[in-house]
Image (cartoon, helix red, strand yellow):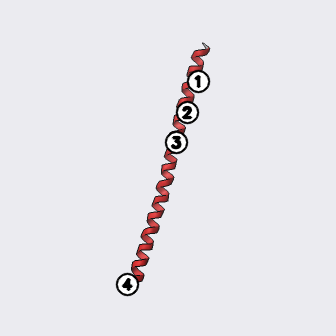
Amino acid sequence: MARTILTIVGVVLAIWLVLTVIGALLSMLKFFFFVGFIAVIAYVAVMLIAKTSKKR
C-alpha cells in the first residue's frame, strides 16, 4: 500500500516538475521575443533617423 502511494506521489511530482520547466522555458522565450522586438524597433528608428539626416 505504501509503495503504491509513494509511486503516485512520485508521478505527481514528476508531472509538476515537467510543467514547471515548460512554463519557465515559455516565459524565457517570451522575454527574449520582447527584447528582440524592442531591438528591431530601435534599429529601424536609428536607420530612419540616419536616412533623414543624410538627405539634408
Q: Secondary structure at mark 1?
A: helix
Q: Position of residue 26 (x, y in %)?
A: 49, 45
Q: For mark 2, what is the residue?
A: 16
At x 58%, y 24%, the residue is 9
Label placed on residue 9: 1
Q: Position of residue 18 (x, y in %)?
A: 52, 35
- Tell me the CA gap for discs 2 and 1: 10 Å
Q: Secondary structure at mark 2?
A: helix
CB atoms of marks 1 and 4 within 8 Å: no
Q: Which of disc 3 and disc 1 is earlier in sequence?
A: 1
**How dense is the environment of label 4, judged by Cα within 10 Å: few (below 14), some, or many (20 and up)?**
few
Residue type (three-letter) at the residue carrying disc 3: Gly
Residue type (three-letter) at the residue carrying disc 1: Val
**How dense is the environment of label 2, judged by Cα within 10 Å: few (below 14), some, or many (20 and up)?**
few
At x 41%, y 73%, the residue is 47
Q: Position of residue 13 (x, y in %)?
A: 57, 29
The answer to whether 56 is drawn above or below residue 36 in the figure is below
Q: For mark 3, what is the residue?
A: 23
Instruction: Tell me the quarter of the picture where residue 45 sits.
Output: bottom left
CB atoms of marks 2 and 4 within 8 Å: no
Outermost residue toward the top in this view: 1
Q: Which of disc 4 and disc 1 is earlier in sequence?
A: 1
| Horizontal relation, residue 36 to residue 7: left or right | left
At x 47%, y 63%, the residue is 39
Q: Secondary structure at mark 4?
A: helix
Q: Position of residue 22 (x, y in %)?
A: 50, 40
Q: Which of disc 1 and disc 2 is earlier in sequence?
A: 1
Q: For mark 4, what is the residue?
A: 55
Outermost residue toward the left in this view: 55
